[in-house]
Image: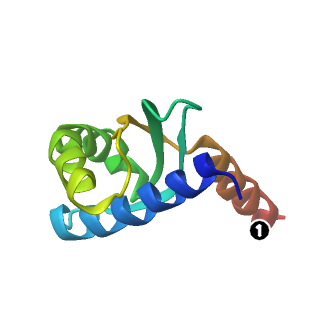
Amino acid sequence: MNRNEKVAGEIKELAAQFLERENDRTSLITIISANVSPDLKRGTLFITVLPTEKETSALNFVRRQLGDFRKYLKNNLQIKTIPFLDVAIDLGEKNRQKIDELLREK
């Protein structure tokens, strides 16, 4: 496992802990994965949201929390450069769920 994968894994775990604490409980937000650029200056958190109707509001909620999450990372992540993060809906997971749904209908 290289350094980028390790840092991305730690960010994913810390994001899950942070959102569990900060979430307003109107939807279930799950961190599916995280990735970081080779220089560790940028990264993306990939999430899924249940119910799916709440995706837009959950995405906006997580984006509003990114500043506080960055401070949380500074306190809990043992690296010199804390990446600037963005958030995206994990379309791979969403597509998998749609395929499962279609298969069940047959």
Indicate the colouring scheme: rainbow
Q: Residue at x 27, y 53 (%)?
A: 73
Q: Which residue is identified by label 1?
A: 104
Quarter placement of the C terminus: bottom right
* Classed neighbour count for the residue bearing mark 1: other residues with Cα under 10 Å, few (<14), some (14–19), many (≥20): few
Q: Amino acid at mark 1?
A: Arg
Q: Residue at x 46, y 36 (%)?
A: 43
Residue sitting farthest toward the front: 80
- 25 shown above or below 8: below
The quarter of the displayed image where residue 76 is located: bottom left
Q: Is residue 33 visible?
A: no
Residue 17 or residue 94, whichever sits in front: 17
Q: Is residue 66 left or right of residue 78?
A: left
Residue 82 or residue 43, whichever sits in front: 82
- 85 shown above or below 19: above
Number of numbered labels in the structure image: 1
Instruction: Tell me where residue 96 appears, x and y as whole percent.
Output: 71, 54
Instruction: Tell me where residue 63 appears, x and y as whole percent.
Output: 26, 38
Instruction: Tell me where residue 94 appears, x and y as whole percent.
Output: 60, 49
Residue 75 or residue 43, whichever sits in front: 75
The quarter of the displayed image where residue 1 is located: bottom right
Disc 1, SS? helix
Q: Is residue 60 visible?
A: yes
Q: Is residue 93 left or right of residue 33?
A: right
Q: Residue at x 81, y 62 (%)?
A: 103
Q: Is residue 25 left or right of residue 16?
A: left
- 12 shown above or below 87: below
